[in-house]
Structures are given as C-alpha cells and as structure tokens.
Amino acid sequence: MTATAASPSLASGEPPINFAAHQLRAGNLAGARDDFEQMLAMLLAAIYPGARAISANPGDWGIDILLGELSGLVVIWQSKYFWPIVTRSHQGQIRESFDSAVAAAARNGYRLAQWVLCVPASMDAPTAQWWDNWRARRQRETGVQIELWHENVLRNLLIKPDCAHVRRHFYDPYAAPAGASPAPRVPLHDLRPEDDAALEVALFVRQLRAAGHTEVGAAKREFFNADLLAREILDKRVPGELDALDEADGLVHGIWEAGFNACLVEHPGNALLPGLHAAVMREIRSSGGFPELLRAGVVHRCGLMHRVVEQRRAGWVTRWRELV
C-alpha cells in the first residue's frame, strides 16, 4: 500500500493544492479536521476501491479509513490535520493513535498489517528524526508496517487522473456564496518620519541589519501596521479576533521555524543564512492559511513576522539570540 510518486501532469491553469483550503471551507480548525478526513476517504476510495471510512460510535477502534475486512487482515489510515507544520507537540497524538489501533486489533480479533499516518504538512527536522526512530522501533515491536503520507505524498496522489474529481472538489479556488461580500481589509497607515526614526533601534530592524539588509523601509511599514492591528485586537478583546490573531501568529512563527531549520542544514557554518528572510516572506505572502476574521492584508501578514522577531522569538541570522 506504499504511495508512489506520480508525474505532475497538471493541465495548464489548474489551481495549486493548498491544504489550508480545509480551513477556508470549514471556517475553523475543528471543521478543517473533519473536512480533511472526508477528502482522504474520497481519495483512498479512488485509489483503492473498497476503502471505507469508519464512524466513531462511540469509538472508532483507532480507525479513520479502512481497507480489508475486520475479520482478517486490514490496512488503516489515520487522519491528522496538523497545521502548518508537524512539530514535537504532535508526537503524543501520533503515539496514542497508533497504540489505539494496535490495541483495538488485538481486542477485536483482526490483524493490522499496515498503519498510515496522513498529514497535510511536513515535519520539522527534530520531529522527522523522532518519527524515523519511533517508526523503526514500533515496527520491530509490533510487526505492523508504518507509513507517513505527508503533504507531498498527498499532492502526488491528488494529481493522478483517477483522483481529479477529489482535487477539484476540495482544492479548486474557494468561492464565497453568491451575493456575499468579502470582509474588508484593515486599512494601511503610512509611517510619520518620527515613527520611522524610532523604529531604527527596534530589535526586528537590528536583526535585519545583522543579516545584511540595507533597505528596511518596507519592513518598518509592515511592522507598524501589524502592530497597530494587533494592539487594537488586544484592546477590544473580542474572543474570535483574539483567536484569529493567535492563529496567524502561530502560522508565521511556524513558517519561520521551518525555514530557519532548513536554512541551517543548507548553509552549515554560514552565520548570515542567505535567502532565509526572502523565503519566509515569500511563503507568508502566498499562504492561504490566515484566518479571514483577522482581515489582514499582505502587508499586515508580513508585519506579523516582524512582530514575532520584535518579541524575541525569532531572527534572521544563525546566532539571532545573541542580538536579543
């Protein structure tokens, strides 16, 4: 049942597959988990006729999607909508899901041949190392083959001709209902000269300077507008807006962390980490995972990254903590 890479034969003009679409369709993370699981059930039915979803009533025996007979040999797919990155915080859920599936098989008299974890993201480096060690150990201990279907595996499956209907249903550009008006973006503000001068000593600017950036005017404007937006939300304390701000903060921080770790591997020993800032900002600008309730445009979204740096949680050089 190992997934094999497919040739990317997308027709010209087809939209890219962005797994943040599940949040846009469902409106929140809880709904996105169910939507992602429904997508997997359709995808697997297209690839493996006979694959079926198992409803939790009250428990699901550790099964989301099943191939085989519960009187004999089965393959189980476990759906986990971890977003935007699979990190250390998810390890406990992975262990618990696998242990539940193994225990249910022994308790109910069928044999678990393979267990496949399906996630719409990639693992950061420490989690990938943990996964490799955990997978090898648990395969030896249980005799169950363990697989990981991460975002690239899923995309390669979704572009297969037999799965075109699944791709179109879940990942064509999301459209609001007819007649609905999109939420207006928060307006942008220009910096006054005195604000520009004051930000010259800000930590996020010093981090950029340390990374070799000469021009930082746009970064200052991004931070200024994002900070105004965040302060207004924190002052008003509307629960939904607070959750949206927190979600966006986690999204940009996760994008930076993944980029930082990848850059360390790609440029070992290079203190400046060339291309890190550009790569992170490019991914933030193209990300579809920002909550609509935040009403943040691209400038605000990039500014949220500078805000993370200003809060001493990130930086643009290898030893960014020394600047802090």
Image: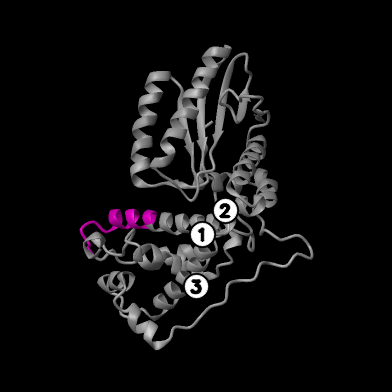
Up-down relation of residue 312 to residue 56 (above or below)? below
Report which quarter residue 256 is drawn in.
Answer: bottom left
Residue at mark 1 to residue at mark 2: CA–CA distance: 16 Å
Q: Earlier in the sequence, mark 2 or mark 3?
A: 2
Residue 247 coordinates in the image, percent (x, y): 51, 55
Mark 3 near mark 1, Cβ–Cβ under 8 Å? no
Q: Read off the residue under disc 2.
A: 20
Up-down relation of residue 214 to residue 107 (above or below)? below
Query: In the picture, which quadrant includes the C terminus?
Result: bottom left
Q: Read off the residue under disc 3.
A: 299
Question: Callout 1, which amino acid?
Answer: Leu
Residue located 58% across and 44% down the image = 157
Report which quarter residue 185 is drawn in.
Answer: bottom right
Q: Read off the residue under disc 1.
A: 245
Question: Callout 2, which amino acid?
Answer: Ala
Residue located 40% across and 66% down the image = 307
Residue range (magenta): 257-271
Residue at mark 2 to residue at mark 3: CA–CA distance: 20 Å
Say whether residue 237 is magenta: no
Can you see residue 308?
A: yes
